[in-house]
Amino acid sequence: MESTFLFTDLVGFTALTAERGDDHAADVALAFYDVVRALLPAHAAEEVKLLGDGLMLRADEPCRAIHLGVRIVDEVAASPLLPPVRVGMHHGPAVCRGGDWYGATVNVASRLCSAAAGGEVLVSESTHAAAGKVRGVAFGRPRMHWLRNVAEPVAVMPASSRRLSLPTAPAELLGRIRARHHCPAITPELST
């Protein structure tokens, strides 16, 4: 059976736990789960399992999965209580055993999540091709990723909502991260 698998991961969760404590970190994780779970029905997706500060999700339709990934990033970015999230997704065959999913497709989706930056959705080329035209989503330039324990590089492209321009996204994201963590901007001092 072919499906699109999405993996999500809160960026900096380990540091957040160390800085703010276990209780606060648990509250953040639960708030994140609530945000994601509220989006699942509208995207015809299901939660497969929790992964600490992330989730494994599955959708039958790759177009809806791409929209879901972008919405997760946008909703999390809009919340001042949540750190940035990264999302990776891949479409292809997998097998279900005991309520969980297995196979190379699942492995690649998980690795793409690890390769994504905070606030980024990485969509494999196979997911993009299977989805066809995806309205309301902007795709960045394709690039190749060598993923751990995957024999061949995987072609991916970042996806975002059209309201966030891709060329400025890293700067905007960095500004949001600095604001959330009260980090001053680093500016080089000029020597005279």
Image: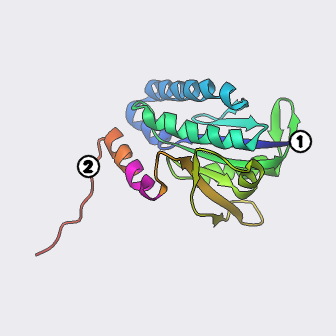
Compared across the picture, whether 14 is left or right of 98 comes to left
Compared across the picture, whether 91 is left or right of 167 comes to right
Q: Which residue appears at 74% of the width and 44% of the height?
A: 62
Q: What stretch is highlighted in magenta?
A: 167-173
Q: Which residue appears at 75% of the width and 36% of the height?
A: 59
- Tags 2 and 1 in contact by the CB under 8 Å rule? no
Tell me where residue 141 appears, x and y as whole percent: 58, 63
Tell me where residue 168 appears, x and y as whole percent: 41, 56
Q: Which colour scheme is used?
A: rainbow
Compared across the picture, whether 61 is left or right of 166 comes to right
Q: Distance between the residues labelled 2 and 1?
A: 49 Å
Mark 2 or mark 1: which is in front? 1
Locate the N terminus by quadrant.
top right
Residue 184, above or below 81: below
Locate the C terminus by quadrant.
bottom left
The residue identified by callout 2 is 184
Q: Which of 87 and 162 is in front in this view?
A: 162
Judged from the image, the secondary structure of the residue bearing numbered disc 2 is loop
Most extreme residue toward the left is 192
Tell me where residue 130 appears, x and y as whole percent: 78, 50
Q: What type is the residue that disc 2 sits on? A: Pro
Magenta stretch holds residue 150:
no
Q: Which residue appears at 44% of the width and 34% of the height?
A: 78
Q: What type is the residue that disc 1 sits on? A: Met
Q: Which residue appears at 62% of the width and 49% of the height?
A: 113
